[in-house]
Amino acid sequence: MTSSAQHVAGFSWPIRVYYEDTDSFGVVYYANYFRFLERARTEWLRALGLDQVDMAARGVGFVVRSVQGEYIRPARFNDALEVRSHIASTSRAAVDFAQRLYRDDELLFAGMVRVVSIDIAKNRPVSLPSAVREALRACLNPSPPTSAATPT
């Protein structure tokens, strides 16, 4: 597994599977795959210098609008995993994150998450703040990563 790395094409974040992440068979509980993806997106925004607490103080937040996931192979207790993320598309108020979870070179889970920028007080979609839009568009890469040897 590579160390966490930020670059223009995407982002990689390490995840360790803890006992609390698993079901009674020692396999990661299905909903926790989305928790792993959430952690990676949050860390990516932080690495880009985008402070979600700051944004919220200015009345803007992110909400998940939709998710898709494909479970390919199970992750298990104590596995060292890597979430590789890239931005598939952006629009005025939304960002589509394509994210994949790997154990070494083995793809375990593939997900697509659409996040929408909202006015927190009105709970309505708003345009992404310009600094956020610029930082995310600089990361735009329509091709998903293919292996651990390819940085994401």
Image (spheres, grey):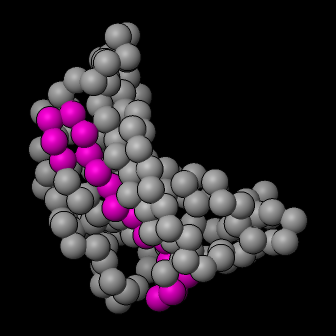
Question: Residue 135, can we see it?
Answer: no
Residue that appears at 57% across and 52% down: 35
Q: Report which quarter residue 12 is drawn in.
A: bottom left
Give the answer, above or below, for where 96 lies relative to 144. above
Give the answer, above or below, for where 66 lies relative to 40. above
User: Residue 47: x percent and y percent?
Assistant: 33, 52
Q: Is residue 35 magenta?
A: no
Question: Residue 115, can we see it?
Answer: yes
Residue that appears at 23% across and 59% down: 88
Task: Point out the stretch of residues depicted in magenta.
Answer: 90-106
- From the viewer's perspective, is 29 left or right of 9? right
Give the answer, above or below, for where 48 lies relative to 79. above
* Residue that protrudes farthest toward the top in the picture: 121
Q: Is residue 95 magenta?
A: yes
The C terminus appears in which quarter of the rendering?
A: bottom left
- From the viewer's perspective, is 63 left or right of 75? left
Residue that appears at 41% across and 28% down: 53
User: Residue 59: x percent and y percent?
Assistant: 32, 16
User: Residue 136: x percent and y percent?
Assistant: 20, 49
Give the answer, above or below, for where 66 lies relative to 62. below
Magenta: main secondary structure equals strand
Q: Total of numbered circles in the picture?
A: 0
Residue that appears at 41% across and 33% down: 63
